[in-house]
Amino acid sequence: MLNIAICDDNEFFCDGIAKILKKILQDCTPQPFNVTCLYSAEELINVLKTESFHIILLDIDLGNNIKNGINLGQEINVSLPLCQIIFITAHLSYVSQVYEVKHTYFALKSDIRTYLPLALTKAISNLEEQKNHTLCVKDKDKNTTFFIPQNTIIYIEHDKRVTKIVTEDNIYKNYDKLDDIEKSLYSPPFVRCHKSFIINLNHINSFQKTVFICMGNVKVPISRSHYNFVAATFRKFIGNTV
């Protein structure tokens, strides 16, 4: 299920975009989809506490809301790093600010019928590309070779000759060296943060001086010798200041 949100404080425009979007999706993807309309920054923030989205169409000027689209985009980059953000706005003056956020597309509302199909096609292509990146490993316990989608890997740990590949729903174990596995991973989002750990930046909730906090409050250490490289990679990855 492709889960999509539209956040715009103009309810008439938001609902209109939803109708256009549904028509485009019917023509460009065979997979089922769900479109949610949200009319304020507060509403989006509350929904993100319990739901996740693959694509978010985000207005930048949200009226009298507590946050604008740029602020929200920065938060989404951290909480839903795989999410494809499409900025929609009536104001060309925001074009420079959007580069403070990792995003997929920027479109003016006046040109939305022209550029929304292109934006959606690019977002869906990015999502498919994430799925197609796999890591081939032979599990030591099951004596079976697995092809693991790299976007599902949270972190990799090497301890006492055994390497654990921790994903969203499984743990794979083998005897491969961490150096060898690292060569097969895309960087970023993967970064070596410790001699015994590789982290996927797409799955972190917060970055501290000595540790990454992942979903479920799982902590992955950052060694002193790796910190400068990790911090620089993280800054570049989210397009924001750590």
Image: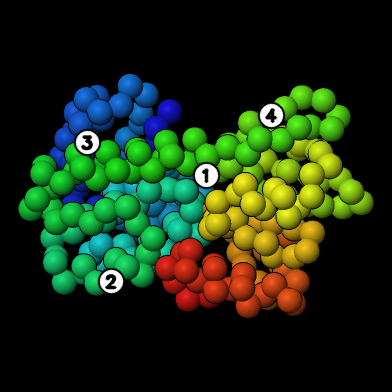
- Left or right of 129 on screen, residue 146: right
Numbered disc in front, either 1 or 3: 3
Residue 65 at least partly seen: no
Q: How far apart in space, not on screen, are marks 2 and 4 (Cα)?
A: 42 Å
Q: Position of residue 127 (x, y in %)?
A: 42, 40
- The label on residue 146 is 4
Q: Position of residue 229 (x, y in %)?
A: 61, 73
**Which residue is under mark 1?**
50
Q: How far apart in space, not on screen, are marks 1 and 3 (Cα)?
A: 23 Å
**Which residue is under mark 3?**
21
Label 1 Cα crowd, 10 Å radius (few <14 / some 14-19 / many 20+) = few
* Mark count: 4
Disc 1 is placed on an element classified as loop
Label 4 Cα crowd, 10 Å radius (few <14 / some 14-19 / many 20+) = some
Q: Earlier in the sequence, mark 3 or mark 2?
A: 3
Disc 3 is placed on an element classified as helix
Label 2 Cα crowd, 10 Å radius (few <14 / some 14-19 / many 20+) = few
Q: Earlier in the sequence, mark 2 or mark 4?
A: 2
Q: Position of residue 210 (x, y in %)?
A: 72, 72
- Left or right of 142 on screen, residue 66: left
Q: Amino acid at mark 2?
A: Gln
